[in-house]
Image: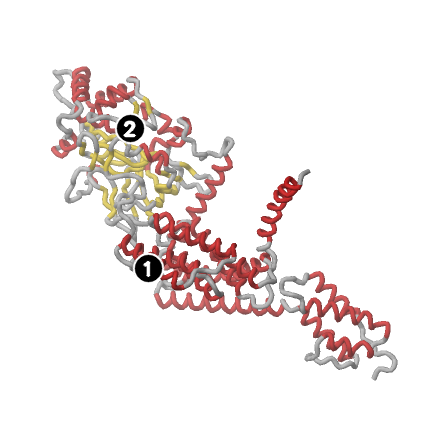
Amino acid sequence: MSMNGAAASSARRGWPALAGRYLFGWLRPEVSSGARDRRDVMVLLIAVSLSVAPHFTHLPWWSTALVVTLWFWRVWLTVARRPPPGRIAMLPLLAGACALVWLQHGTLMGHEAGVNLLVLLMGMKLLELRTKRDINIIVFLTFFVQITLFLYSQDLLLALMCVFTTLLLFFILLSTNLVETDLGAARKARLVLTMFVKAIPLIIALFLLFPRLPRPLWAYVGDESAAGTGLSDSMAPGSINHLIESDAVALRAHFEGAVPSPGRLYWRGPVFGHFDGRTWTARTLSPLQPIEMSKVMIDPKSAVEYVVTLEPTQRNWILTLEMPMVIDGSPYFQTIVGEDLQPLANSVIRSRTRYRVRSYTNFVIGPTQAEPDLRTWLELPARFDPRTRQFAADLRIQVVSPSEPDPHARDAELVEAVLNHFRRGGFHYTLRPPALGRDSIDDFLFGTRLGFCEHYASAFVFLMRALDIPARVVTGYQGGEINPVDGNLTVRQSDAHAWAEVWLPGRGWKRVDPTAVVSPVRIEQGQAELASRMGWTRYRGAGGLFGWVGVWRMNWEALENLWNQSVLNYSFDRQRSLLLDLGLTPSWRNLTIAFGGTVTVLLFILGAFSLGHRRRSEPLARIVYRLREKLNSAGFPAPSSEGLTQLGQRLEPWLAPSQRTQAAQLLADLEAARYAPLSRRVKAADIRRLRARLRRFRPTPGPGSS
């Protein structure tokens, strides 16, 4: 083999070994202070990246790019062992960052500008890192940056990541404050985890008993235009079908009894009655009129009681099953059910909200006789969709006899005739419908015949109105997915749906879902099964090649729901209920007493545990103490101020010759264990052997000893 080939082979073998030495070098104690500092800085950079990365989703692009550049610059300075830039060189960078923040936000104060500036300043502080004091400053800045993350999200995954980052920061503080001897990574990790475990009871007590206010002292109100549900205040072709790609949770429901069948899981949302030829919007009702209870007839046997956890909608929509008769949202909001049967709250739902509902899935609602108000549900835009209007006129002639005295007597037959047209007319359900032109209803009914739920609902309502039958479009969600871990029904964005309601004489408003006649799978088995058949599998189920993904996901979502209910929804009222469970009258005085007493007792217990642990952590000192007691009892003075080396030198001529070797080895081993470096942990087995050797040692003076 040539020299060049041997060198190349040696280099190839050397890279893995070099990488291994560099990686595992962080795990073992460092003797050099410079090597310790570089290792601690690299660990600090990892912690900083974990705390800053979630901010990139809302920071401006230039801010993200600058922070990433500063971070890699610091990595290069650490690895290459280069000095940081001078303080004067940092001034233009600081001025430029402040100017960019001012231009972006118009201020250096406030929520968005403050977080942006804080992240940039921390990046620049990393760049000028020099002393242990700078490391401490960055550690505490990182703690503060982590707090600001919860202004944007309080998800379980973010909380777990913040806990891990906090442990990593304490790891760094412990490492940088070791004055004399370094410790191994495993030893430091155990110390940090021990501190964390000791703090858990105090964390729980602070969470449960720290006084909570009915309303926050301050709150950040986000962008109200970003509706959390994915639904909109209008509907046009393509406005719902894009949600099939989103697995985000819209709501969760926990039923007190059996979950209703899929055909009854219609979660009612916005109702649309105005059509401009392309888009459906809500009718203007000013002021909002509640439904008259005299127009509602329910079947008591169809009652369903459940608790809904609704994700933020940034609207005042309340999603419930039809027909909601009781909605208990106290103390967060009051509700009203409008004439169009849409439940609305008296405040915007800006955070995750729980409310209890009793719905009746069998009901008759609305006037049973024609009223003038019903005419508003017949409006159609002029000069749009002429072929559809002609088709409706021809259909009426086929179904309704000209001699029929009541023009609405055959409305039910007309509804069924339109559904039969969808059923037999070559229509297909698709997740990727083609674009439609100006006359969107004509293009769909007589051209593409391919559509999603909003296409069928829109065309059906248009045809009903053209047939002089009052009708409206209802949007919301249909179906849901039962989580076998906690039994909750999860409704996702991909379950968004649109259907229709028509008014029939003597029967009031009735739900008609034209999608069900074209694609029964969508209603009977849900959007997930339909999407899977169409190639949009998202690995929800527990079977198949990726079944473990579905199992993991169900467990994770159950944990998320537990986090939401137990932690994020722990409110002022639930704290008052806790006091009642403890037998205390809910008051600020009793809450303060319970809080102060619990924290005092926990601190006392933790202090006693720590002191006891400290006493138990010095077994070698007790062995040395007992050795001195044995020597004093045998007549040999062994003062506590004398070191073991000096003690052994005096003891050797005093002892009998047969005991000198035993005593010398015992004292040498005790001294080696007692004053070993902190990085070398003395094993419990070694301590037990030293105790046994001490018990066997019986000092006896030799001949000639005084």
Question: What SS does tag 1 mark?
Answer: helix
Q: Compared to 703, does 465 lie above or below? A: above
Q: Is residue 43 visible?
A: no
Specify which label sits upstream in the sequence, 1 or 2.
Answer: 1
Identity of the amino acid at label 2? Asp
Residue hosting label 2: 513
Q: Residue at x 30, y 49 (%)?
A: 350
Secondary element type, mark 2: loop
Point out residue 8 in the picture as x, y percentages from the top left corner: 62, 42
Q: Residue at x 17, y 43 (%)?
A: 288
242 sits to left or right of 553: left
Q: In this view of the protein, can residue 395 be seen by the observer?
A: yes
Q: Residues within 10 Å of mark 1 (few under 14, many from 20)?
A: few
- Location of the N terminus by quadrant is top right
| Residue 7 in picture, x, y percent from top left | 64, 43
Q: Nearer the viewer, residue 576 or 231?
A: 231
Residue at image mark 1:
95
**Residue in view at x 28 percent, y 21 percent:** 449
Q: Residue at x 12, y 16 (%)?
A: 403
As rendered, which of 306 and 671 lies closer to the eye?
Answer: 671
